[in-house]
Amino acid sequence: MRTHNKTGRGKNAPRHVRIYRSMMRTEAWQALSAVEKAVLIELYALYNGENNGELFLSCREAARRCHINKDTASRAFSALEEKGFIRRRSKASIDWKLNLARCWILTEHPFPEGTAPTRDYQYWRRLDDKTAALENGQTAPQNRTGKKGAPAERIHLRDKSIKNSKTASIETGHR
């Protein structure tokens, strides 16, 4: 016979991982790869409702749990951190006396010291090619017309290396 607490819920309810649809509808979630989602679910599995900020999961352990390479797990942690799903609380430490895995904070849940959840993933946006290029100090790529067989857009520049100031035509666009 199952015992219930005063709210009507079972005292020994099975542990589970809860992912809300509101999180799944964000642009950050949709940009995650399957590996990144698997690592995030492993972090959520460590969360018990009270231990946010004390979630210890190393790259090697995440790799073992998700059946991936440790370098892939490391890239997944970096992507999750960049997209705002997790924050690093402490770095990993390997010492001859003490080995510590990285300590993670889930941004969806409140922090034990009374900090409200930040949900940084809600504010993450994918940069388009032009914005990303401009942030890196490059020129923005020109788009093709989209029609099959249509010529690429051309930019006319004055090329100083050509004598008599001839106009050089340079084809731009993605190939």
Image: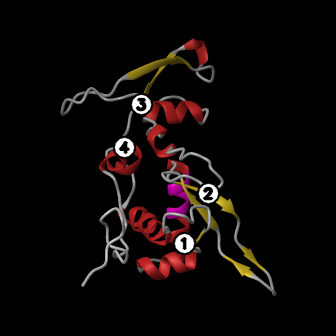
> Amino acid type of disc 2?
Pro
What residue do we see at 36% from left, 69% from top?
5
Question: Residue 57: x percent and y percent?
Answer: 57, 73
- Kindly report the distance in space between the C-alpha atoms of the residues bearing marks 1 and 2: 31 Å
Instruction: Indicate which disc, 2 or 3, sits on the residue closer to the N terminus.
Output: 2
> Amino acid type of disc 4?
Thr
- Kindly report the distance in space between the C-alpha atoms of the residues bearing marks 2 and 3: 53 Å
Question: Residue 69: x percent and y percent?
Answer: 49, 77
Determine if the magenta segment contains residue 122. no
The mark lying in front, picked from 1 and 2, is 2
How many C-alpha atoms fall within 10 Å of the one at disc 2: few (<14), some, or many (≥20)? few
| Mark 3 lies on residue | 172
The mark lying in front, picked from 1 and 4, is 4
* Mark number displayed over residue 71: 1
What residue do we see at 31% from left, 67% from top?
9
Determine if the magenta segment contains residue 80. yes
Is residue 56 in view? yes
Asked if 50 appears above or below 12 in the picture, the reply is: above
| Mark 4 lies on residue | 26
How many C-alpha atoms fall within 10 Å of the one at disc 3: few (<14), some, or many (≥20)? some
What residue do we see at 37% from left, 48% from top?
23
Looking at the rendering, the stretch of residues picked out in magenta corresponds to 76-81
At numbered mark 3, what does the secondary structure look like: helix, strand or loop?
Answer: loop
Viewed as shown, does residue 71 lie left or right of 101? left
Is residue 138 in view? no
